[in-house]
Image (cartoon, helix red, strand yellow):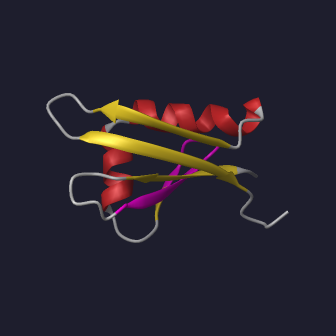
Amino acid sequence: MALSEWSDAVQDYSNPRALIWLDGHIEQLDDARGARLLNDVPEITQYAQVLPPSGISRARFTWVVPRGPWVLASFNCVNPRGG
């Protein structure tokens, strides 16, 4: 099953990352910050879920979190099984 790998460049520029599975499940990678932000902003997860079926393998955009940080979202579609 393909998935989207998500990372952002939030205020501290530390690039928290998370995996977003096609079914919407969010898996934290380095620490919980990326997964926490994705849980707080479900619209970003929804964008990630439509990338693999659309044939788009990469996407970047800026998302302004209401009353929060600007997020540089960067998506790369990957296959967790390496194929």
In the image, is residue 83 part of the stretch drawn in magenta?
A: no
From the top left corner, tell me how far across and down residue 70 is, in percent: 26, 38
Side of 4 relative to 1 (left or right): left
The image quadrant of residue 62 is top left
Q: Residue at x 73, y 50 (%)?
A: 2
- The relative height of residue 23 versus residue 67 in the rendered view (above or below) is below
Q: Residue at x 14, y 31 (%)?
A: 67
Side of 33 relative to 76 (left or right): left
- The relative height of residue 73 versus residue 65 in the rendered view (above or below) is below
In the image, is residue 21 part of the stretch drawn in magenta?
A: yes
Seen from the viewer's position, the closer of residues 81 and 76 is 76
Quarter of the image that includes the C terminus:
bottom right
From the top left corner, tell me how far across and down residue 38 is, in percent: 38, 45
Side of 51 relative to 16 (left or right): right
What span is in magenta?
Answer: 15-26
From the top left corner, tell me how far across and down residue 26 is, in percent: 49, 52
